[in-house]
Image (tube, rainbow, N blue to C red):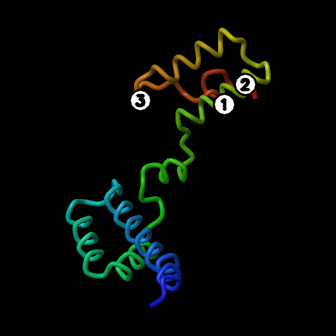
Amino acid sequence: MPWFWQVVLLLCFTIPVIILFGYAVWDVIRRHDAGVGFKLLWLIAFIFLPIVGALVYLVIRPPGTTKQQNAIASGETTAGDELQKLADLHDRGKLTDQEYDHLKAQQVDAPLSTKPGTVQEQHGRQMM
C-alpha cells in the first residue's frame, strides 16, 4: 500500500477511533455517580470491544454524569461566575474599588463550605 493511502487511513480512521476510545475511558473514570464495579465493567467492555463498547457507552450514558454538568444543569453558580459578575458590576461603576476588592477577597479566600452567597444575595437585586 502506498504511503499516501496509509496516511489517509491513519487520519480518517485510526486517530478518530483512538480519540473516541480515550474520551470514553476518561469519561467513565471521572464519573462521580458510578461505583468502582460499574467503571471496571465498562473499562473491560472497552478493552474487548474498543469501537462498539465506546460508542454504546457514549450513546446510552445519561446526561449530567459529571459534577460540572450537574452544576450547570441545576443552575448553580461557580466561583468563576461570581467573580465575573463582580468584575462586571465594578466595570459598570456599581461597585467602588474598595467594595470590589473586599468582595473578590471574600469569594477567593473563603473555603467552599462557607462561601458567601451570590452577588445578588450579598447586595440585593437593586444593583442589577
Q: Which percent across, then down, holds residue 97?
A: 69, 11
Residue matched to label 3: 112
Q: Amino acid at mark 1?
A: Lys
Question: Which residue appears farthest toward the bottom when viewing the image?
Answer: 1
Please say if the residues under marks 1 and 3 sit with CB atoms less than 8 Å apart: no
Of residues 16 and 114, the one drawn nearer to the viewer in this rendering: 16
Residue matched to label 1: 85
Of residues 114 and 78, the one drawn nearer to the viewer in this rendering: 78
User: Which quadrant of the rendered structure holds the N terminus?
Assistant: bottom left
Q: Which percent across, then down, holds residue 66?
A: 42, 54
107 above or below 51? above
Please say if the residues under marks 1 and 2 sit with CB atoms less than 8 Å apart: yes
Q: CA distance from mark 1 to mark 2?
A: 6 Å
Provide the secondary structure element on which disc 3 rests: helix
Q: Amino acid at mark 3?
A: Leu
Specify the label residue 89 is tagged with.
2
Provide the secondary structure element on which disc 2 rests: helix
* Residue drawn at point x = 46 percent, y = 19 percent: 109
Q: CA distance from mark 1 to mark 3?
A: 18 Å
